[in-house]
Image (tube, grey):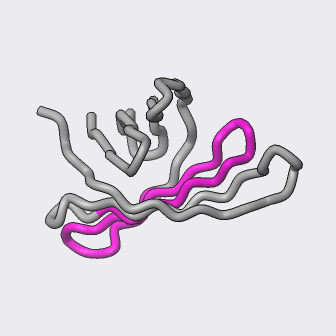
Amino acid sequence: MATLSYPGLTANVKYLNDSTIYWKTTDEKDSVAEETNRMVVKKIDGTKFFVSWIEKDGTTVSQVIDLEKKTVEAFLTFDDAKGKRIAQTLEGTFEVDK
């Protein structure tokens, strides 16, 4: 399991196998969301990975995880409250739980 910490949001992630991710997020208002999704993983180099998936509501998540620097950069696209497609970037930390 891994913990990804972004400003205002924490995600606990389990990589169930090479193509399945389970995630559970908690935001600063204690709102919780969780899903299991099919994912794609691509090794960039010895310590960096590109991870991407599509959530049930259509949100797309693409991350670059750097195991050496313990960082994660995420790019999300999703529909806002009015149905308009928007994008968001997040930067955070990545810790493998022991």
- Magenta residues, dominant SS class: strand
The image quarter containing residue 3 is: top left
Residue 42 in the figure: left or right of residue 45: right
Q: Which residues are magenta?
A: 41-65
Most foreground residue, 93 or 37 = 93
Q: Nearer the viewer, residue 17 or 6?
A: 6
Query: Magenta stretch containing residue 45, yes or no?
Result: yes
Extreme residue toward the left, this view: 98
Q: Is residue 20 visible?
A: yes
Q: Taking the image as drawn, is residue 25 in sight?
A: no
From the top left corner, tell me how far across and down residue 26 is, in percent: 45, 30
* Residue 49, percent from left and from top: 34, 64
Q: Where is residue 28 shown, x and y percent of the image?
A: 44, 34
Q: Position of residue 7 (x, y in %)?
A: 39, 50
> In which quarter of the view is residue 84 placed?
bottom right
Q: Which residue is at 74% across, 39% downward?
A: 57
Location of residue 17 by image quarter: top left
- Residue at 64% from the left image edge and 54% from the top image edge: 60
* 43 versus 4 height, above or below: below
